[in-house]
Amino acid sequence: MTIKQLSAFVENKPGRLAEITEVLHESNVDIRAMSIADTTDFGILRLIVNCPDKAEKALRDAGFTVSQTSVIAICVNDEPGGLHHALKVLSQVGVDVEYMYAFISREDRSGAFVILRVGDEETALEALRKNNIKLLAAESIYDM
Amino acid sequence: MFFQKEIETMNRKDLEQLQLERLKWVASYCYENVKLYHDKFDRAGVDPYKIRTLGDLRYLPYTTKEDIRDTYPYGMFAAPMKQIVRIHASSGTTGKPTVVGYTKKDLDTWSDLVARLCAAAGATDEDIAQIAFGYGLFTGALGLHYGLEKLGTAVVPTSSGNTEKHVMLMKDFGTTTLISTPSYALYMAEVATRLGYKKEDFKLRLGLFGSEGCTTEMRDKIEEAWGCFATDNYGMSELMGPGVAGECELRDGLHFAEDHFLPEVIDSATGEILPEGATGELVITTLTKEGFPVLRYRTKDITRLNYAPCACGRTHVRMDKVIGRSDDMLKIRGVNVFPSQIESVLMTVPQVGGHYLLIVRRQGFMDTLEVQVELIDSSLLTSYTDLENLQKLVKNKLHTVLGIDVKVSLVQPNTLERTTGKAKRILDLRKEGEEKAGK
């Protein structure tokens, strides 16, 4: 149970991010979650959107270097220790987390959502399921 | 394939005899008809009527681009305007353009020589050739145009600009031969891919590239993108335009049209003539031109001459692909760097595109070189490590070739400037820095 994340290459220059959001806007793409890290020269913009294939094509046609990566989305209790519980499960089975970012939704106030990119997806999914951590299906995120 | 086989395969003794006769003619013709040359001969105390051997060429005065600028526009025309039938001018990136004129006979020779190089590259009267050089004052487009027509090739004069239309016509017309700069050929391939065309949609089999340098690696990239056989040719408007030298199908050097051009290689700093096979600045004397003859023209192009016979049967001397221009040579922390060296490294890294920009800065007393390349491989976006490794790989490869450290910057695709003419690939900010520091 994985979801599609878009990764786009962005130069560290004024206006570059806005060029990407302009393309998404024009293609009527809704952004669910996003993350970008700052480095000196360039960044990789990670996006969860409502229609990843359409968004990827729009960005590629506009000349961006873009690709799809599979990530895991989980829902944790929005309370102290909620995220810790899930991460501990992963650490116990020796799965490393490459990066993660979180968001909350308008409807479901009780849970916080976390996007995880892990080294070993199979092992991670199995361990999360066994420990009753709520995994989100692709559709439920896209339709959020 | 030959266009003028008898001349192209002439034995060297006869060729040198022909050159000597023509050299005697052009020296006296320049002396009698161009004031600049009259003065140069007199000042140097050289008698143009006393040339006895080809070796006497060394006594003749050099001609520079500045000479042509100083006599703008017609000062170096040797024929009266009554006999001039065409005028061309260089792009003139700095100041006034350099203006050249042709008599009817010059145009006839010109189209013969272009036909020669096209035939040598493999073009025939069955081909359909699309010319993507800008028509106008620039010699490239019209030079190739009349040469290809003389060969019997069907010429499609699309000129430059509107790349989408170019690509469409290439498919619809079944174009087999493309005439352009190497960088524009690559750009056209990018556009074709973006528009959804496949290699099989085109009948392109041959590319004749010129007007800017092209490394073997860049050529390989063009061939891969278009599935065609790519050849390089050499010329400049001061000498005639395209047609001065071109590759035969063996692509082991560019054959000079030695019956019309006499090449030498000199040390560009001292002006000393270098021995056969040495690398230096190419100097050329036109042997038959009437409208705009030049004696020992300093091309500023760095190359090497090879007099060994070629397996194709041509006896005319070959020059290596131009390594760079003596004034394009960047001196970074005391090391000579030619953009072509950087280009040949980048072409071996498939994750980055074919376009690049070199930025030179001075920080304190240190020169720095930044190389900007476009990231095209989207599979590297999973982690920053992959991108940083790519930067390191390019940096290390460049260090191996250049011997200096450079900064490698990855930029977004299609953000570096594309041109239909000569690509501008160097941004030297050192002078600006010095001015600022001086204020």
Image: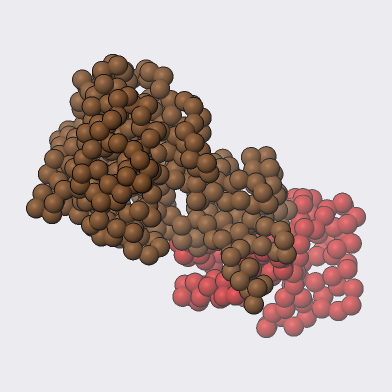
Residue B332 in the figure: left or right of residue A52: right
Residue at x-position 29% and y-position 22%: B16
Q: How many marks?
A: 0
In this rendered view, identify the residue nearer to me: B16 or A83: B16
Residue B272 in the figure: left or right of residue B393: left
Position of B60 relative to B5 (above/below):
below
Name the colouring of the figure. by chain
> Residue A106: x and y, percent?
67, 83
Regarding residue B319, the answer to whether it shows in the image is: yes
Q: Quadrant of the N terminus of chain B?
A: top left
> Residue B327: x and y, percent?
50, 51
In this rendered view, identify the residue nearer to me: B44 or A138: B44
**In this structure image, what is the colour of chain B?**
brown
Q: Quadrant of the C terminus of chain B?
A: bottom right
Residue A45 in the figure: left or right of residue A122: left
Residue B345 in the figure: left or right of residue B29: right
Residue at x-position 77% and y-position 77%: A111
**In this structure image, what is the colour of chain A?**
red
> Residue B320: x and y, percent?
44, 32
Pick out the residue farthest to the left.
Answer: B82
Position of B171 relative to B435 (above/below):
above
Regarding residue B91, the answer to whether it shows in the image is: no
Residue B381 quadrant: bottom right
> Residue B341: x and y, percent?
56, 42
Position of A109 relative to B368 (above/below):
below
Position of B164 relative to B26 (above/below):
below
Residue at x-position 26% and y-position 18%: B14
